[in-house]
Image (spheres, rainbow, N blue to C red):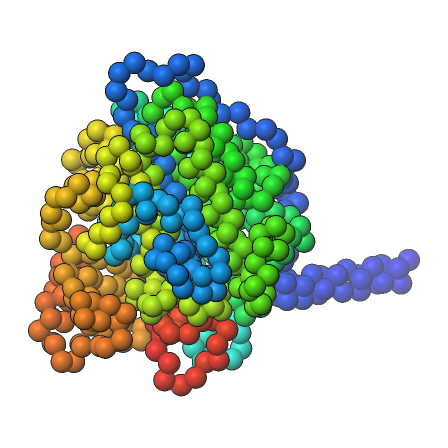
Amino acid sequence: MASRVKRLGIAAVILVLAAVAAWLTWPVQIMVTAYRFTHPVAANRPVHWAEGPATPPAGERPPNIVLIVADDLGINDITTDGPGTGVAGGLVPTPNIDSIARDGADFTVAYAANATCSPSRAALMTGRYPQRFGFEFTAVPDELAKYMPRYAPQDRPYPILYHADLQHQAPPMGQMGMPASEVTIAELLKTRGYHTIHLGKWHLGEAKGMRPEDQGFDESLGFMAGASKYEADTAGPEARLPGDPLDRLLWLGLRDAVQFNGSKPFHAGEYMTDYLSDQAAAAIRANRNRPFFIYLAYNAPHTPYQATKADYNALGAIHDERARVYGAMVRGLDRGVGKVLAALKAQGLDRSTLVIFTNDNGGTKATGMPDINKPYRGWKGTFFEGGIRVPFLVRWPARVAPGQKLATPVNFVDVLPTLAAAGRAEVPTDRKIDGIDLLRLMTGQPAPERALFWRSGTYEAIRDGDWKLQVSRNPSRIWLFDLASDPTERHDLSTSRPDVVQRLRAELAAHDRELAKPLWPALLEEPIRIDYPADAPWKPGQEYVYWPN
């Protein structure tokens, strides 16, 4: 008996040691497996959109509004600017996206409100710099920030830093989001009788009060987190990024699941980009006889990189495997935009619908493709033009003249005032609204003078007129560029024009005094080289910034 107890004790010790070793070796894998076990995804089920009136209303009706936002699209990934532009030097045409610019206005100097996704989306929804209400950093789980360094490439001279001392200050990811006290586009348009619909990515909070159905949307179909798989693993061509720890974790943890009005998650049942596009078309049909606002937030072409076989097979001229998969995803995105435009036309709504196409930030270094933000320097996670310049295309045939190219700098904070003006809704007067009504610019009125601001922790930037200043405190560095003569930020003038540096730093300081304390701390700082994609060799002297998040 004693020997049996002893053997059981030894076995128990071995099991405990094995469990500890497994936890130390595969902590994220264990957490993901446990999460998947406790949060199953149901089979696909039909979605039934609320039906509007059976007949059109009498008299004039306000315009329908469709706001389409891509995810991590490079400024050079679409072919709006003609031959030679687009993925792989123009081998992936985007005719449907291009048609929005051709039939309306192309804002050629358009900026996201941040160089990562969720703060940009918060600005898009509110017309305010997100730092005004503490939404300074992208919502990421504490576990992700804690364990990303484990998977970082070992050849990096500047490793990812994790702020362990701040861990206890971070709320759960689901509680990282836009406060319920903020007023969204959807809430404004509802006051004018609009039926409001969210489709796709949210990434503005999962807790009660932060979800789309709590922030003014009558109906919501999509995923609350910052990314999603496009279909089941091995269902089609894919490309993995072994040097990118985030990509590795997304492949491990994500599923192709959506929720409808807060339901339990269920599988989309088809390629996610096509699914969201088909559902947007169905929502348009259901609401054809009442004013509607649709926020269609694609996750394409964000990692993980998955494509349909048809799109992949259509791009045989692209020989690089990763570029071919990525290009196929952009091709699918353009097809999805085409489905939405076709649905509007089929319902006789294309002339009376305001359509905006844009993207949440610049293309990411993780692709390994050097030209996605060409000709601009920088990536997602930097305030160089490549990190924040985005397409911003507006089509409204009943009001906006076709073929316009407008070079006035615009920003995501302008979306709420513009859509409020289109829908004849009053913008809030009890808080600072940072944006302007872009309809005025599209109808020939002059643009007001203003500066544009960006901030993420210890890194910030300002554009005032043609001058642009970036200030980084890790590493300590200042860049000053005259964008009129140097739009691609090649010639730093910070030492030769100290007067401009001093003036712009004073403007930054004054703006900073208006901002709120971050609602949660930055959990990591990632080193991002300005001029090289992630998989290029690191060499001494390459310029970089730490991106706090």
Name the residue rendered at 25%, 64% in the picture.
460
Q: Position of residue 538 (x, y in %)?
A: 45, 80
* Side (left or right) of 172 relative to 412: right
Name the residue rendered at 57%, 49% in the picture.
229
**340 or 536, which lies in front?**
340
* Side (left or right) of 135 relative to 167: left
Q: Position of residue 175 (x, y in %)?
A: 42, 44
**176 or 398, which lies in front?**
398
Q: Residue 546: which quarter of the image?
A: bottom left
Question: Does the rendering let one see residue 121?
Answer: no
Q: Position of residue 423 (x, y in %)?
A: 25, 30
**193 or 321, which lies in front?**
321
Residue most extreme to the front: 83
Q: Residue 205: which quarter of the image?
A: top left
* Side (left or right) of 35 relative to 435: right
50 versus 501 height, above or below: above
305 versus 412 height, above or below: below
* Side (left or right) of 6 relative to 391: right
382 versus 540 height, above or below: above
Q: Position of residue 504 (x, y in %)?
A: 14, 66
27 versus 284 height, above or below: below
The quarter of the picture where the C terminus appears is: bottom left
The quarter of the picture where the N terminus appears is: bottom right
Name the residue rendered at 41%, 31% in the picture.
345
Name the residue rendered at 14%, 61% in the picture.
465
Residue most extreme to the bottom: 540
Question: Does the rendering let one see residue 235?
Answer: yes
